[in-house]
Image (tube, rainbow, N blue to C red):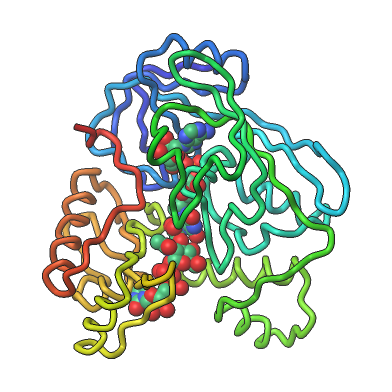
Amino acid sequence: MELINNASLKDFTTFGVEAACDHLYRVEDYEELKLAVQYLERPLILGGGSNVLPIGDIHRNVLRIEMKGIHLLEDGDQPIIGVAAGEVWHDFVMWALRNDLGGVENLSLIPGTMGAAPMQNIGAYGVELESVFHSLQAIEIGTGKVRVFFKEECKFGYRDSIFKKEVKDKYVITGVNLQLTRDHKLNTTYGAIQDVLIEKGISHPTIHDVSDAVVSIRQSKLPDPKVIGNAGSFFKNPVIPTEQFEKIKEMHPSLPGYPAEVGLTKVPAGWLIEQSGWKGYRKGNAGCYEKQALVLVNHGGARGEEIWELAQDIISSVKDKFQIELNPEVNLWGNEK
Ligand code: FAD
Ligand code: EPU
């Protein structure tokens, strides 16, 4: 375990905002992690830093999870693969493709680590982690007790899980077990995937073709954090009562909406933000990305406070115009009351 005192979180988060952190521990060893979570006071857990915005300096112990390893746990038609929390998510997707295992191809190129994936039940292009999730291992912070969470216990929802609610900040996830397929059932229902496949003249796609299509769509829309700091979608897409959706649609007929649970409709926050006039807006070094209004960006040298101020301005302007409250998807650090 390597300890960096007075570390800069700029190098460990994709927003790239300047923020000092008193003690950053890089943990590659499971037993060391177990000891650390018992003895360090209220540690913050960090993976790839692609869904975190530090606001100001962080006077906490930060544990960066870097344990590696991918193992076949159970073979068969739907093999179960055990993956250490520090594995990079996209590297795992590539591993699955190399082994002709399906189920995660639509989730290609999502940044971050395996351990963070269950936190918000990562999702893209019509698929969410829960569709391949089997179970996970975690260590309880404070006691060091090991616990297994099976799928039902994780209470997965849209960008949601038990780890963001009932047991928030109580566990560090150390490994995730995923159940993949050998007999692939492709999901190409998300419009843009079909368009790319047709454009390429592919009528019988493989999991590799779907992954390639997803990668090219993502690269055309989303900013590369190595070039421009960001954390993907800053806000969740709001899910509102269908009745409210229909009323707003009467005034704004182009409002898109997707059916959610019974009586609820999901509305794209990117549309609401664009219609409120923010797309491409820049104030100082913080901005709203010109190709995707849902992504807030650091044009270079922005502080976390600046990004968060812009986010709050967007929240109140969307509220004024549409009476819809946006909620951040990104985890705000240093903002805890
Ligand atoms: P971090 O940012 O390090 O942490 C995120 C949260 O999880 C924090 O609260 C942290 O404390 C906690 N955490 C991290 N690791 C652990 C662990 N081992 N145990 C317990 N808690 C932990 N997300 C999507 O769902 N779909 C997308 O399509 C998508 N696209 C993106 C595109 C871009 C360009 C970017 C920058 C981000 C995107 N994201 C997307 C968000 C991000 O990739 C995911 O949320 C990812 O799972 C975060 O992983 P991470 O390792 O970087 O987590
Ligand atoms: N839209 C606009 N203007 C914009 C952006 C979007 O009008 O500037 C509207 C369009 O109508 C578009 C619709 O929003 O058709 C949906 O846009 P897009 O397909 O880009 O998806 P999204 O809802 O903005 C969500 C996820 C992404 C995920 C993509 C693909 C959330 C919060 N975001 O974005 O996840 O990659 O779908 O499945 O659910 C992330 O979580 O960080 C993330 C990038």
Q: Nearer the viewer, residue 130 or 52?
A: 130
- Residue sitting at x 16%, y 51%: 309
Provide residue 161's location: percent of width, then percent of height. 46, 45
- Residue sitting at x 23%, y 51%: 307
Does residue 36 appear anywhere in the picture?
Answer: yes
The N terminus lies in which quarter of the figure? top right
Q: Nearer the viewer, residue 155 or 178?
A: 155
In the rendered image of this protein, does residue 302 appear above or below residue 169? Answer: below
Left or right of residue 318: residue 229: right
Q: Nearer the viewer, residue 43 or 136?
A: 136
In the rendered image of this protein, does residue 145 appear above or below residue 81? Answer: above
Left or right of residue 225: residue 103: right
Left or right of residue 50: residue 238: left
Q: Nearer the viewer, residue 51 or 185?
A: 185
- Residue sitting at x 81%, y 47%: 79
Spot the residue most to the right.
Answer: 76
Provide residue 322's location: percent of width, then percent of height. 18, 74
Left or right of residue 68: residue 60: left
Provide residue 55's location: percent of width, then percent of height. 24, 38
The C terminus lies in which quarter of the figure? top left
Provide residue 333's location: percent of width, then percent of height. 30, 36
In the rendered image of this protein, does residue 100 appear above or below residue 86? Answer: below
